[in-house]
Image (tube, helix red, strand yellow):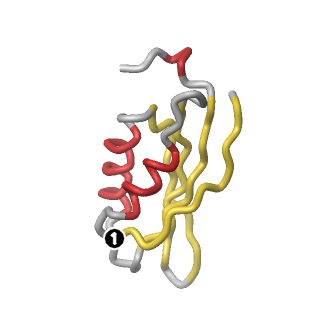
Amino acid sequence: MRDKMDLNVVARIRITPDSIDSDLNKIKDELARISSDYGKLHSAEIKPIAFGLNSLEAAILLNDSKGGIEEIEENLKSVEGVSQVDVIDVNRL
């Protein structure tokens, strides 16, 4: 487990499902599992996009010298129900 002092960057991502039937709670669980290899899932919130489609916006805590956001992004793209993964922003804590 990572020391909290290690985590000095927050990356915000938006995950767009491939349909309104995609289970965003399952996607969130997968995000938490994938994130734990590189840092920690800090928060995740379901937000409406349009016409009944929602996205999942999440904040992940990482260590800037160890990276991980690209790996998280690539792993998420292979999760069932995920259409698109976008990094919204990355900031130092």
User: In front: 63, or 42?
Assistant: 63
Residue 23 is situated, as x and y percent measured from the top left of the image, at 32, 66
Number of numbered discs visible in the structure rendering: 1
Residue 40 is situated, as x and y percent measured from the top left of the image, at 45, 33
Query: Image quarter for residue 93?
Result: top right
Vertical position of residue 45 compared to residue 81: above or below: above
Query: Image quarter for residue 77?
Result: bottom left
Residue 50 is situated, as x and y percent measured from the top left of the image, at 58, 80
Vertical position of residue 83 compared to residue 45: above or below: below
Residue at 58% from the left image edge and 27% from the top image edge: 65
Tell me the residue that label 1 is attached to: 81
Question: Split into 4 quadrants, where in the image is the N terminus?
Answer: top left
User: In front: 61, or 71?
Assistant: 71
Residue at 51% from the left image edge and 30% from the top image edge: 66
Residue 58 is situated, as x and y percent measured from the top left of the image, at 53, 49
Vertical position of residue 27 compared to residue 36: above or below: below
Give, as a three-letter code, the residue at label 1. Gly
User: In front: 24, or 7?
Assistant: 7
